[in-house]
Image: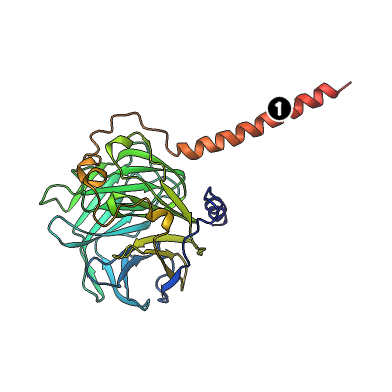
Amino acid sequence: MLLAALLAGPSAVPAGAAPGAPVVDRTVRDPRITEGSGLAESPTRPGVLWTHNDSGNPPVMYALGPDGSVAAAVRIRGTDDEDWEAMAAYRDGDGRAMLAVADIGDNRAARRSVQVVLVAEPALHDATVSPARLLRLRYPDGPADAETLLVDAQARRMYVVTKGFGSTVYQVPEQVWPGPPAGAPAAEGTLVRIATVPLILVTDGVIGPGHHPLLRTYGELAVLPPITADVVGGSLQPLAQVRLPSQQQGEGLALTPQGQVLLSSEGTGQPVLRLPMPPELAAELPSATPSPSSSSPSSLVPAGGRTAAASPAPRGSGAVRWVVVVLGLAGALAVGTFALVLARRP
């Protein structure tokens, strides 16, 4: 992941914008967790974090206690870990604590569909559980690699954010999630393209106060504006972004109930870092009592993305434009040099 570090690290972040000094929240020492990818704070048990391994591992969620030990290993019946990349914790419309595991990784962009597995948060002991629902999802414009699942429980919205040199936000259609009150065990649908995000290699995200998405890359953390109808077909420009502490392969992001940032990394024996919300990002987030005009669910994209009639921007357009500019300058320099050589020939 040297390329990822080089690309993510030197992004345009103002000098001195690094967040406050992180502390080690806990160290994951269980040898079964070698590629911890997703991270979520338990909705019901203070201090408990849920995580899972990346592709090629058993379909198991691990509950991490405050000391970093595994309090429970829970296998999900009837599904595989084809490429588990993210998870989110939330409460459903009935108040039940739920976990969503996103099997959305696709490094070769070859999967015909991806899926999100929903389970009721299990008790803290080893067990095998059945999914509450399976959401099978297709992209409207061909396969894509993704590592980020966003669940806005208050607004009843779910989003997938792709990973690339520029990312795209897709919404899970309303009929798939949340779906009808007595939804079928499995649901299928086509994701709705919402907007591009000019961030390179997004590896995780979470919905913060006021419906603001927070997205992490290998080297940065950014806060975005709420996903409203105004952004459909356009670009979600970060309101602020900061450098993150160095990690081996930073792929997990969660928020504590107190609004602190938790960061996890792939690899064996990796620490989970905790730091206060960086002031540059906190300045863009609403207070504990947000105003209805800025964060009311009614201002968000209608479930199912029915306003998404605008022509979508090309996937990864922000990064692509940057690459085109660089290549254009390089080409102009080469042509100019060649012309100068010809002009000087006798």
Residue 205 % position (x, y): 36, 54
Q: Is residue 238 above or below residue 28?
A: above
Q: Which residue is mark 1?
A: 335
Q: Tell me where residue 225 appears, x and y as whole percent.
A: 34, 45
Q: Residue furthest left?
A: 182
Residue name at image x 16 percent, y 47 percent: 179
Q: How many numbered discs? A: 1
**Viewer-proximal residue among 38 and 16:** 16
Nearest the eye: 274 or 264: 274
> What is the quadrant of residue 206 in the picture?
bottom left
Q: Secondary structure at mark 1?
A: helix
Q: Quadrant of the N terminus?
A: bottom right
Relative vertical location of residue 218 with respect to residue 343 in this rendering, above or below = below
Please tell me whether residue 147 is drawn above or below residue 321 in the rendered image: below
Q: Nearer the viewer, residue 300 or 129?
A: 300
Identity of the residue drawn at 40% across and 33% down? 313
On the question of residue 104 being in view, the answer is no
Q: At which x and y percent is residue 55?
A: 40, 59
Relative depth, front residue between 235 and 55:
235
Residue at 34% x, 60% y: name it.
81
Give the x, y percent position of residue 224: 37, 47
Q: Amino acid at mark 1?
A: Val
- Asked whether the viewer can see residue 160, the reply is yes
> Toward which corner of the image does residue 51 lie, by quadrant?
bottom left
